Amino acid sequence: MHPPPATAQVRVRRAEISDLDDLVALELRTFDGDRMSRDQYRRHLDSDTARVLVASANHRNFLGTAVVFFRKRSRVARLYSLASQPEARGKGIGTALVEGAEAAARQRKCHALRLEVRADNAAAIALYQRLGYERIGLLKTYYEDGADGWRYEKRLD
Ligand SMILES: CC(C)(COP(=O)(O)OP(=O)(O)OC[C@H]1O[C@@H](n2cnc3c(N)ncnc32)[C@H](O)[C@@H]1OP(=O)(O)O)[C@@H](O)C(=O)NCCC(=O)NCCS
């Protein structure tokens, strides 16, 4: 498997049931704790209050994923999960997925997208700040291992 060239056109689409194996495998490769299970993914694929996105490029069908949650009476969407394949990082896949999440939130008439990120996750924080996300709160010992988090938000109006 080769990573796509830097010029790859990244396509973002809605995840389907046939993506389940890839979704679970990437989750296992990416996160040590706070993982989403196969059953949770399956439910989110079918849910009105979730949107699971997949990025592809250059004939590679599965390069990363983003999960967005919506709440019925809220106009604030939540970017719950974001990951790209380790060998394909730094080529715009994360960016395309976040933009896809923003588009999904706008489609649902949300006026903001929020997310939480580990305070020690420099790559993700740099990506969010480059895309215009603003730090709105510190989450003390937010993660399973006791790590702090930051809450970020971007206005979509
Ligand atoms: C965060 C993540 C999704 C980014 O995906 P990606 O496909 O590499 O995203 P992009 O190529 O669009 O952007 C990468 C950006 O990361 C930043 N970056 C990458 N490596 C970095 C590092 N070691 N230190 C600081 N910033 C870094 C840069 O800002 C880069 O942007 P640039 O291309 O303008 O320099 C990916 O690193 C990942 O899956 N990480 C593990 C899971 C994770 O942490 N998810 C976020 C949880 S909130």
Image (tube, rainbow, N blue to C red):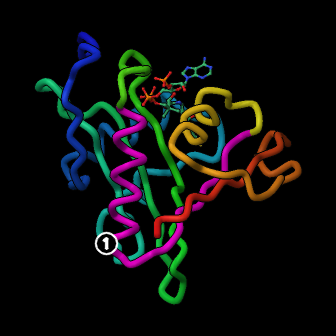
Q: Which residue is pictured at 80% across the width and 51% down the height?
A: 142
The answer to whether 151 is drawn above or below residue 1 in the figure is below
Residue behind label 1 places its C-beta within 8 angstroms of ligand 1: no
Q: Which residue is pictured at 24% across the width and 13% down the height?
A: 5
The answer to whether 152 is drawn above or below residue 77 in the figure is above
Residue 105 position, x and y percent, is: 40, 67
Query: Which residue extends farthest bottom?
Result: 73
Query: Which residue extends farthest top?
Result: 2
Q: Is residue 140 left or right of residue 42?
A: right
Task: Classify residue 107 by image quadrant.
Answer: bottom left
Q: Which residue is pictured at 87% across the width and 48% down the height?
A: 141
Q: What's the magenta region?
A: 93-118
Q: Is residue 32 left or right of residue 5?
A: right
Query: Which residue extends farthest left?
Result: 59
Which is more toward the observer, 131 or 125? 131
Question: In the rendered structure, which amino acid carries the disc numbered 1?
Answer: Gln
The answer to whether 88 is drawn above or below residue 143 in the figure is above
Asked if residue 99 lies in the magenta stretch, the reply is yes
Asked if residue 67 lies in the magenta stretch, the reply is no
Q: Secondary structure at mark 1?
A: helix
Q: Is residue 49 left or right of residue 33?
A: left
Which is more toward the observer, 98 or 142? 98
State how many labels appear: 1
| Residue identified by numbered label 1 | 107
